[in-house]
Image (spheres, grey):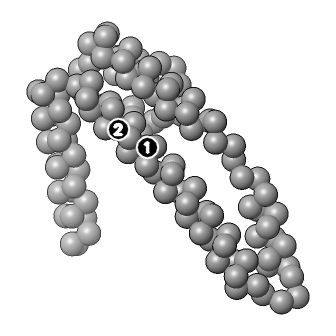
Amino acid sequence: NHDRHCGHHAQHTPIKRMLAGIELSDTQREQVKALVQQSRAEHSMTPPDHTARTQWQALLTAEQFDDAAALSLLQQQQQRQLEHRLAELKLRHQVLQVLTDAQRTELLEKWQRRQQKRQTRQST
């Protein structure tokens, strides 16, 4: 039943995974779906930078390595990653606002259990 909360779109599996096991009302499912669609629409307004790959290839195949150009490309790449991560965090925050206090508590407990599992695996 929780598969319905994001509609039929599998692209936003982080939200789907985040809410797995949380019972949502139909209204909440619709609100989450609308938030995901809004986020997707806002994010799709930023066109992908297809020139970056060409610029990397030109940089790597040039006779002389250009430190300044490499640094500039790395900074552009980092900026895009930051913007993407920020949008992702904003969406998660908005989705959390749709949940009841009990659902939020359930989700936080789930996150804590997952964190403890990770720590246990890392220490072995």
Q: Is residue 74 visible?
A: yes
User: Would you say 101 lies left or right of 72 here?
Assistant: left
Three-letter amino acid code at the position of disc 2: Arg
Q: How many marks?
A: 2
The picture places residue 104, in percent across and down from the top left corner, at: 17, 32
- Image coords of residue 25 (percent x, y): 26, 13
Q: Is residue 10 visible?
A: no
Residue 46 in picture, x, y percent from top left:
64, 42
Give left or right: position of 111 versus 34: left
Q: Is label 2 in a helix, a strand or a loop? A: helix
Circle 2 is placed at which residue position? 92
Q: Counting other residues with Cα less than 10 Å from the Cα at mark 1, is it few (<14), some (14-19), or many (20 or more)? A: some
Circle 2 packing at 10 Å, graded few (<14), some (14-19), many (20+), is some
Q: Does residue 27 lie above or below 58 as drawn?
A: above
Q: Is residue 40 left or right of residue 106?
A: right
- Check disc 1 and report the residue beneath it: 88
